[in-house]
């Protein structure tokens, strides 16, 4: 194996691919990056944690074909420190890969490429295959406004993914962790019908690579139990979560008894202040008292308390409700200063938060029962 | 106690003072900030870790004099989240301090101010009192180019401070940890004669507050076993380290057998790359091979090795020497791309690094003995 390329291109390819390196693994080969020469005068650079696989390409002058496994984190770090310019690499007979760039020569112990497991393969059972195309910026927004609500524990593995639900010209991305739920809705021009649960880590990595440019499009292929997509030179593949996602439509209340319209930015600031005090207590609670044209936000702990008053348009009965402060502030962060409508049935039923001016987002938070 | 002030002024005062909060303490009152009303329509805001004390001031309308201890970190964080505008505060009868700012009301449990220990007092023995005045930007530079070499363990407490040595119109700041030494020299117009060891933490906090403006001056008063200084509204006092500092002049070699002149920026990049490989090994070593108009920089560990060649003007015998990579890269970072002169006696004697174009900085590094 022998090639030369620009050190900048090499750094960029490694930065993208190594995002798929596992944080922990029992398969040592997965800690490596797989570098293969390609026929089209380029390198294929692959990393995978077995669930998520990222393959990217780097233009190169290939003198001798081959493949090698190199320690992923280390080679990414070393490449970032290389001088900018032309670099060459070849595999030495002692099993070391030798990189030369200007006056610098680095040897790294390589492992045989055939130790790398099969990753990124789709299975043959072509059930439910479908494609979905949308602007990259839209997909990025859908991911960022929902993925924070993904479950972080593995107790119910299906909840560590986001549901992608496309039917009748509407695409929904849904994340929930048993305490709150985030739904992002968007009309799409396609007639595709999709029900797939995409792993959270894959979505977060995809969001990092996606462009904010509204004219750049992305197509997601749902195929053989995988989600496959390409962004520029990079191919991403993720194994879909198996199992049934929670019926999110069923748990979304359709009625309300009390409704408050207010500025999410103002509420967010009040909740942030309340959270500093709540955090000192045991249960991290923020209490909302809704009525009389205002919302009173309070929190208390041994060290002190916070009392905030915020004007709001209120309809219906007054009511008291308490939330885990984190769930409320996460939702408000996503709503980013928009006017919102908060819908309540009672102090013990889920609260629904939607933008006052659209139906693109719905957030549901379970309250905490308090003796008040 | 009752006052009103601008929330922005209050935040700024707390940000400055709380830098002196101890990271760990056995005196709970020191975890607090002491807020006192002053006669001149302002607040005195004090934090101390008993060694370092920072007192700053905040303009305020004082309606009722008084003093209170409030949890330092918490009140600093809460103040940062307050709306910008006028805020008022008063001490309630239940021992809570109540802050109001726009629609927000926060109560924080206060402790009696008389629990706060006496801090920042000078002792009566006026031995060796002296003043030193210099531009703030110069003091900042002297601190930043030496304090990284301060000892981090408490084995020899005197070495956790920097020596300030002013004699015959020359000011020197010296830090050493037993493995390396950093000396920063500067001619000063004053005739002061000072030998004082200032605690590293105090210097680092002073450096944060100092301005980069060359026309802003600072005066350090050495008095009663303390270093006292004011920067704007802020007074800083630090207890000087007791004991004899190492005679740094005696340990600085005055001769050399081999001398290399080269670009510190280039060497720094080579050493950074070498460090990535060295770090994987046991001893974190970088080896320098000096001779034939170049320096060859190498490092190796199980995972691979790095070989770098750098042109240099070399005088004297060739020689091989090895360093802890951290000590070498710390020194090069401070020299910030300047041309440097490295002076060697042999592979087992300390190496001296000075700028090629000045005598404002001297760095000494002990080599690591290797079998080569």
Image (cartoon, coloured by chain):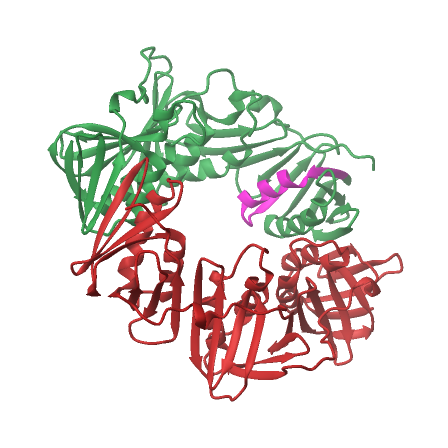
Chain colours: A red, B green
Residue A333 is a magenta residue: no
Asked if B45 appears above or below B294 in the picture, the reply is: above
Q: Is residue A234 visible?
A: no
Q: Is residue A132 left or right of residue A104?
A: left
Q: Is residue B207 visible?
A: yes
The residue sitting at 71% across, 69% down in the picture is: A45
Q: Position of residue A62 (x, y in %)?
A: 78, 74
Asked if B52 appears above or below B224 in the picture, the reply is: below
Q: Is residue A92 left or right of residue A330?
A: right
The residue sitting at 28% across, 43% down in the picture is: B12
- Using the image as rendered, state which of residue A41 and residue B44 is in the foreground: B44
Region in magenta:
B320-340
Q: Position of residue B339 (x, y in %)?
A: 58, 47
Residue B215 placement: quadrant: top left
Q: Is residue A244 left or right of residue A287?
A: right
Q: Is residue A256 left or right of residue A23?
A: left
Residue B234 placement: quadrant: top left
Asked if A186 appears above or below B194 in the picture, the reply is: below
- Using the image as rendered, state which of residue A15 and residue B161 is in the foreground: A15
- Using the image as rendered, state which of residue A93 and residue B111 is in the foreground: B111
Residue A11 placement: quadrant: bottom right
Residue B334 is a magenta residue: yes
Q: In the rendered view of the protein, which quadrant contains the N terminus of chain A?
A: bottom right
Q: Position of residue A225 (x, y in %)?
A: 66, 75
Q: What number of labels is visible?
A: 0
Asked if A80 appears above or below A305 in the picture, the reply is: below
């Amino acid at each position: 194996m022998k090639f030369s390329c620009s050190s900048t291109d090499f750094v960029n390819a490694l930065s993208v691919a190594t995002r798929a390196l596992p944080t922990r693994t029992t398969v040592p080969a997965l800690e490596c990056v797989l570098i293969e020469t390609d026929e089209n005068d380029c390198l294929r650079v692959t990393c995978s944690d077995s669930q998520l696989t990222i393959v990217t390409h780097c233009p190169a002058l290939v003198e001798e074909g081959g493949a090698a496994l190199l320690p992923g984190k280390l080679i990414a770090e070393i490449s970032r420190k290389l001088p900018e310019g032309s670099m060459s690499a070849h595999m030495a007979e002692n099993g070391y890969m030798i990189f030369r760039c200007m006056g610098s020569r680095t040897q790294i112990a390589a492992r045989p490429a055939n130790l790398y497991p099969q990753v990124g393969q789709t299975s043959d059972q072509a059930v439910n295959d479908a494609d979905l195309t949308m602007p990259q910026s839209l997909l990025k927004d859908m991911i960022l406004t929902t993925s924070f609500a993904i479950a972080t524990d593995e107790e119910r593995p299906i909840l560590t993914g986001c549901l992608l639900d496309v039917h009748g010209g509407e695409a929904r991305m849904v994340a929930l962790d048993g305490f709150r739920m985030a739904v992002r809705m968007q009309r799409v021009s396609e007639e595709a019908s999709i029900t797939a649960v995409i792993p959270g880590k894959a979505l977060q990595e995809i969001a990092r690579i996606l462009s904010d440019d509204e004219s750049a499009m992305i197509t997601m292929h749902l195929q053989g139990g995988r989600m496959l997509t390409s962004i520029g030179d990079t191919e991403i593949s993720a194994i879909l979560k198996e199992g049934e996602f929670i019926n999110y439509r069923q748990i979304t209340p359709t009625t309300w008894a009390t409704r408050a319209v207010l500025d999410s930015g103002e509420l967010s600031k009040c909740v942030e202040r309340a959270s500093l005090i709540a955090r000192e207590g045991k249960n991290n609670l923020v209490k909302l008292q809704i009525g009389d044209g205002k919302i009173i936000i309070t929190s208390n702990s041994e060290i002190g308390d916070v009392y905030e008053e915020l004007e709001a348009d209120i309809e219906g009965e007054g009511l008291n409700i308490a939330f885990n402060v984190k769930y409320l502030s996460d939702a408000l962060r996503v709503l980013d200063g928009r006017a919102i409508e908060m819908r309540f049935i009672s102090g013990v039923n889920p609260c629904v938060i939607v933008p006052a001016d659209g139906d693109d987002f719905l957030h549901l938070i379970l309250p905490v029962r308090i003796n008040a």
